[in-house]
Image (tube, helix red, strand yellow):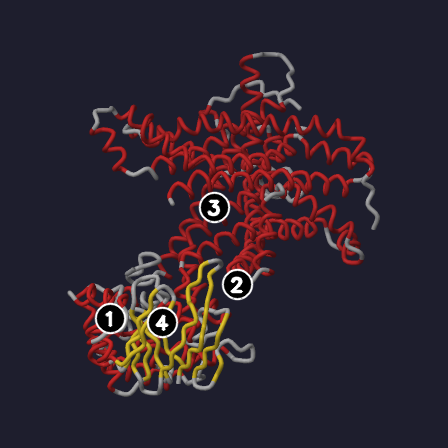
Amino acid sequence: MTFHLSPVLPLGAFDFSVFLRPSPEAVLNNLSYLLVGLGLSLLLALASWVVAFVVGSVVGVMRTLPGRILPSIGVCYVELFRNVPLLVQLFVWFFVVPDITPLLGDRFKQQVSPFWQEFIAGTVCLGLFTAARVAEQVRAGIGSLGSGQLGAGLALGLRRTQVYLLVLLPVAYRILIPTLTSELLNLIKNTAVASTIGYLELAQRSASMAETTARVYEAFTAATVLYAILNLLVMFLARALERISALPGFLGVGGNK
Amino acid sequence: MISIRNISKWFGEFQALNKCSTEVGKGEVVVVCGPSGSGKSTLIKCVNGLESFQEGEVWVDGVSVASRKTDLPKLRARVGMVFQHFELFPHLTVVDNITLAQCRVLGRSKKQAVDKAVQLLEMVGLVEHQPKFPAQLSGGQQQRVAIARALAMDPIAMLFDEPTSALDPEMINEVLDVMVKLAQLGMTMLVVTHEMGFAKRVADRVIFMDRGEIVEDRPKQTFFENPETDRARQFLSKILTH
Amino acid sequence: MLFDWSSITGSLPILWQGMIVTIQITLVGALVGILLGMVLAVLRLSRSRILSWLAAAYVTVFRSIPLVMVLFWFHLILIPLAAGLLFPGQRLELGLLTALTAFSLFEASYYAEIIRAGIMSVTKGQFSAGLALGMNRGQVMRLVVLPQALRRMIPLLLTQAIILFQDSTLVYVINLDDFFRKAYNIGNTVGTLNEMILFAGAVYLVICTLASGCVRQLHRKLIVLPVK
């Protein structure tokens, strides 16, 4: 598929009024068209992040537990979700799973609106995909605390679950804020893949706008700027979170050792 | 109070403990010493079940540590442990470190727990550091808080795993003083340490371990004056020149 | 719920064609990406503030936008633009070229970061020792720092290549027929979409699991063992 661009647009000839003209959906203008796309990207990202954080924490913790069964389940989960391409996983959740699930699958295909079908498939897919990466971070975070903290908690008579919830995870999460932030940023970028099943997020909309208005530069520049702004916003919030949760004098694991 | 009967432990092929047996009676202070790698830390961790063992038995106040029926957390709540690297919880203040297990394990009210914490902090001389975080304290102060944290559970016995080995020299004494005080108050203590001065002051017995075995187990006086084995003699001569 | 796997055997030739495209994208993307990434890394570490800033800007821009968008950019703007300038008036099949270019430039930003981190992980002491022996900066980089840095980087570079192998499936959005797209098309036409999707997934799973297993072994040999 080739696309001819006859006039070579010099950078000075940006036509910003294109943003105020009617959008492909004929709802408001192009700028709001893109902004809605941004909102949809963000929505999908946040929903997926909730899934990723919860599932990833559970799997990550499982990998640090003693015994053979639970850690192995954790390893299998991570290997499975990290070694299949995201697009393939998305198609599995969107096409294959509803098809082969006996009762719920049919209901899903027939009674749920396309938007929600896409959203749910996207959330489940991105959530579980990112969870595998979060699990690795959580595992490394807990591992970096050393066995001493676990031992100290157990020696006081706390049960293992209590030690994890009251001692290990609170400290591990603080250490992990930077890496988890970059996972969230990756997740936001990965929401663009949902466009392949029809979810009209920002990247797809910028391409649509480019094709309908023939203003390719403006469309893509706008989308790039919006993604960049979103990036900065997330990083700003992450740094604020780091500052709020910082412990006085605590520079990192192994303070006085 | 603590009864270690013929325990042996292997880490894979490597044998860390070889048929170790000893008793610690109520109110006794027993010091365990020996070269590194002799199994001292492993032995003491078997007492509260932090390390498992393949052969033998360990009984604490009539409860078998290795038995499947034993509620291990409950047992551990009754035996206090102090670690070489203090292991205070970095995200909690000094006071919260001491009250956490009191509330969650013993079910004490927050007020009871805090009162107890303050009382113990007074005993170790750190009451004004209540609201601070562990990273803001020196090593010696952290270890004293760790001792208070263990004592807050009203243990029947205290285990010390090289409590001063990670401290700078000038802070060792402040911790040893607290431990001496504890011994004088009649606490049953099993202490792994290199500090022979401490042993000479308050120990009732001294155990010498080498390569996973208990080589000597004698009253303090006889151990220092007249060790039976050459290994113990060599060890003492190297240590006591300080 | 009966699966019909029969369509797979018949379509292997077509699938193989798609796999060739996938492999091309992976190899070119990785090789060009690493070369360009090295240039970018060195630029970022250079003394010239302008060069350093330019390289940093490149890396930052490519790392903050989705790969899908980069593919759209190249597909709708940049490649046709270049084609229009170089071969005016001709209609060309630009799909593969778009993919190769886009992936190479995109991956370069990720490789640049890996390489830069690898170089920085070699201590200053090593650098000073080289200078003290009378070598100039360039020599020290080439003879002392880079060889050490490379050992640490290689597992990460390979891991990134595995990620690239998986990301190549995104050429779906520019309608290029890679392995997955071929599988999807066949499934759609024959009516065995589920089977083809699962089959493709299984193929990727096997290849990537084996590959990452090898990288882990390599990591142990290169990094973990020598330290002991």
Type of the residue with mark 4: Ile
Type of the residue with mark 1: Gln
Q: Are marks 1 and 3 in contact (CB under 8 Å)?
A: no
Camera sees residue A26: no
Find residue A66 and name its label: 2
The residue that appears at 58% across and 25% down in the rendered structure is C98
Q: Quadrant of residue B27?
A: bottom left
Disc 3: which residue:
A230
**Who comes first in sequence, dot 1 or dot 4?**
1
Q: Nearer the viewer, mark 1 or mark 2?
A: 2
Circles 3 and 2 on the same chain: yes
Where residue B197 sits: x, y (%)?
Answer: 19, 74
The Cα–Cα distance between marks 3 and 4, rounded to whole angstroms, is: 64 Å
* Above-or-below relation of B71 to A247: below
The residue that appears at 47% across and 46% down in the rendered structure is A230
Q: Nearer the viewer, mark 1 or mark 3?
A: 1
In the rendered structure, the residue with mark 3 lies on which chain?
A: A
Type of the residue with mark 2: Pro
Q: Nearer the viewer, residue C175 or C6?
A: C6
Q: Nearer the viewer, mark 2 or mark 4?
A: 4
